[in-house]
Image (spheres, rainbow, N blue to C red):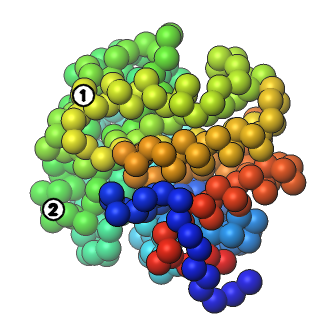
């Protein structure tokens, strides 16, 4: 199809902005073919595109510009480690000590000079225990995490890069997560929005079995409302596998959940195959059809479908 198609929205958009549809694909911000393939499959273009960046990469200005040109807000998940070399907690310590200030200033200057909006999602899922920057692993602490966050934020904003929006992104809270999120909140003055990572890994993982969206997200949302009342929040990473239940039914329930939760501003689907977990929307004909139905049911009547 081409052109603009008007569809009826089941989500009452008068209450706030329409739900934003986001994607993360293996190729990141420049993955035009990957993004278009999903758009063709589900009948809707992504309004947000998320990419993961090595902390020592150069600022991805050209890639962000491509995403913005295509009508999608760029989200940079900025990971404080070196993908090919240093995966230790030393990067966080270096940030706090000021040893990387010159490097941070380069990011600040280039983002400022670019001038368009970008969401920065620094050191995500810090309340877990699987990354070297997590608050309760290695020699880290909640205070060291907060110090690193505030230091980076202050350097970039002080340089005039006020086109940045800062997304504090937690892993969903569940029994066994090492630390409560209220101990790691950097503060209202340095956080613009909050993201939640949560997946239905079914029987493909040891993450608690088959769970619907409400079971995955509701507890964390209630915590967020206490920790940061009034801050907007959305689903920063999510996905579902085929193993353990009906993926099509899960996706149908997921979109119904989003349509009824007017407090959730948007959702980014992690559209990647990470064996044994294949999170992609089109792992089966039924999952693709369910995703398309849901994506189209929450689209704004002023948005473009594919």
Which of the numbered marks, if any, corresponds to residue 194?
A: none
Q: Residue at x 40, y 42 (%)?
A: 195
Which corner quadrant holds the N terminus?
bottom right
Location of residue 214 with respect to 37 vertically, above or below = above
Dot 1 and dot 2 residues touching (CB under 8 Å): no
Residue 158 appearing in the image: yes
Which of pointers 1 and 2 indicates the residue nearer the eye?
A: 1
**The residue positioned farthest toward the right in the image shown:** 285
> Which residue does the numbered mark 2 point to in the structure image?
159
Q: Residue at x 59, y 85 (%)?
A: 4
- The kind of secondary structure element at disc 2 is loop
From the viewer's side, name the closer residue of 242 and 140. Answer: 242
- Compared across the picture, whether 196 is left or right of 254 comes to left
Query: Callout 1: 10 Å neighbours few (<14), some, many (20+)?
Result: some
Which corner quadrant holds the C terminus?
bottom right
Residue 208 % position (x, y) = 65, 17
Q: Residue at x 50, y 11 (%)?
A: 175
Residue 3 % position (x, y) = 63, 89
Residue 110 % position (x, y) = 30, 69
**The residue positioned farthest toward the top in the image shown:** 176
Q: Tell which circle, 1 or 2, labels the residue nearer the N-terminal end.
A: 2
Residue 25 appearing in the image: no
- Compared across the picture, whether 25 is left or right of 260 comes to right
Query: Callout 2: 10 Å neighbours few (<14), some, many (20+)?
Result: some
> Which residue does the numbered mark 1 point to in the structure image?
227
Residue 165 % position (x, y) = 29, 56
Q: Quadrant of residue 14?
A: bottom left
- The kind of secondary structure element at disc 1 is helix
């Amino acid at each position: 199809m081409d052109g603009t198609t008007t569809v009826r929205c089941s989500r009452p958009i008068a209450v706030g902005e329409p739900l934003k549809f986001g994607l993360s694909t293996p190729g990141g911000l420049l993955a035009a073919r990957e993004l278009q393939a999903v758009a063709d499959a589900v009948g809707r273009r992504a309004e947000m595109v998320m990419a993961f960046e090595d902390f020592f990469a150069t600022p991805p200005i050209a890639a962000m510009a491509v995403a913005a040109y295509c009508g999608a807000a760029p989200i940079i998940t900025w990971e404080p480690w070196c993908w090919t070399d240093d995966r230790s907690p030393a990067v966080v310590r270096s940030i706090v000590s000021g040893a990387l200030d010159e490097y941070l200033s380069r990011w600040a200057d280039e983002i400022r000079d670019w001038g368009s909006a970008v969401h920065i999602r620094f050191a995500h899922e810090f309340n877990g225990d699987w990354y070297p920057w997590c608050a309760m692993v290695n020699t880290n602490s909640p205070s060291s995490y907060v110090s690193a966050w505030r230091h980076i934020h202050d350097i970039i904003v002080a340089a005039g890069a006020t086109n940045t929006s800062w997304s504090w992104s937690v892993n969903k809270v569940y029994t066994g997560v090492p630390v409560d999120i209220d101990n790691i909140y950097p503060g209202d003055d340095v956080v613009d929005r909050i993201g939640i990572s949560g997946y239905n890994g079914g029987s493909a993982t040891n993450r608690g079995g088959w769970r619907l969206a409400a079971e995955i997200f509701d507890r964390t949302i209630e915590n967020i409302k206490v920790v940061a009342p009034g801050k907007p929040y959305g689903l920063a990473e999510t996905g579902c596998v085929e193993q353990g239940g009906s993926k099509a039914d899960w996706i149908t329930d997921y979109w119904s959940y989003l349509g009824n939760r007017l407090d959730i501003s948007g959702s980014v689907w992690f559209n990647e195959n990470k064996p044994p977990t294949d999170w992609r929307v089109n792992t089966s004909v039924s999952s693709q059809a369910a995703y398309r139905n849901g994506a189209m049911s929450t689209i704004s009547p002023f948005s473009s479908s594919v």
